[in-house]
Amino acid sequence: MRIIDAHNHLLDEPGFLAGLLRTMDELEIEKTCVSGLGPLFGMKDNAAVRAAFEAHPDRIVGAVFIRPGVDGPEAVRRGFEAGFRMVKVTVPRGPYDDPAFLPIWARALEYDMPVLFHTGTVAPMAQGRGERISSWAMHPMRIEPITREFPALKVLIAHLGVVWNHDAADLARMRPNVYVDLTGEPDGWRVRADRDGMDTWLWWPGAFRRVVFGTDVHYTKMKTILDQDLARMDRLGVGPETRERVLGGNIAEMLGI
Ligand SMILES: [Zn+2]
């Protein structure tokens, strides 16, 4: 079965890319969609991500990091022209649904680049003083107006909203082209969610057809995340066709690969 990690990052530590690729081989992960959120998150930047997918075009898909309010639609264009095939947004300078950001989403749609939105509480490495970081700005329902302006935009809601699971799941239930990922640390929000049962939020028939596999953890923890995700799908009786979509089919379709 084809496995694609739709949500991971390039950390700023020696040998990270080699470690990621080695882990992908071990876990039989065909491709990983990678972004670099820069020093605020202890990560490399877009330039390093570009170098990574240029060196490993069959394994690494580049997600260009856009910070709305700092970066505008031109950054999406530059990213696309450089070979990035996805957009990753987090820590916007205002709420995602700020009308000033509409040209960013318009540009992503123009290039048919899926947009991976961080949603929920955010944990930068640094305090972020002066950066105007607010998790409220990344509430999943902030994405609703974007899906109404651009219903064909391919939207991926990260972490099922972290603390706003109901809202994230319901947006995926109600809107076309909206998907969720269940990424996060093995000891993070997933512990609570799995204790209560992920189907508390993903409750409707076919809900898992809207789930996209990703890890968003250091490569040393990727196996744990994959194992947990497979066990969850066993537990919840997710069938083979849906499982194939979750593990790679959905993101492959979104990326046109
Ligand atoms: Zn992430």
Image: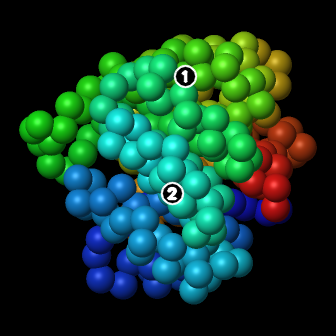
Q: Quadrant of the C terminus?
A: bottom right
Rendering coords of residue 11 (x, y %): 35, 67
Circle on res. 169: none
Q: Quadrant of residue 62?
A: bottom right
Q: Quadrant of residue 174?
A: top right
At label 1, which amino acid type do we have?
Ile
Disc 2 versus disc 1: distance between alpha carbons?
19 Å
In the depicted structure, whether residue 106 falls above or below residue 54: above
Confirm if mark 1 falls within 8 A of ligand 1. no
Pick the front one: 20 or 142 = 142
Q: Residue at x 51, y 50 (%)?
A: 74
Helix or strand or loop: what does disc 1 sit on?
helix
Rendering coords of residue 77 (x, y %): 58, 55
How many numbered discs? 2
Q: Is residue 19 toward the left or the right of residue 246 in the image?
A: left
Q: Is residue 164 visible?
A: yes
Pick the front one: 191 or 70 = 70
Rendering coords of residue 129 (x, y %): 10, 38
Residue at label 2? Answer: 64
Circle on res. 143: 1
Pick the front one: 194 or 257 = 257
Q: Quadrant of the N terminus?
A: bottom right
Q: Is residue 208 visible?
A: no
Q: Residue at x 27, y 54 (%)?
A: 41
**Who comes first in sequence, dot 2 or dot 1?**
2
In the depicted structure, whether residue 16 falls above or below residue 208: below
In the depicted structure, whether residue 7 falls above or below residue 166: below
Confirm if mark 2 falls within 8 A of ligand 1. no
Q: Quadrant of residue 60?
A: bottom right
Q: Residue at x 41, y 74 (%)?
A: 48
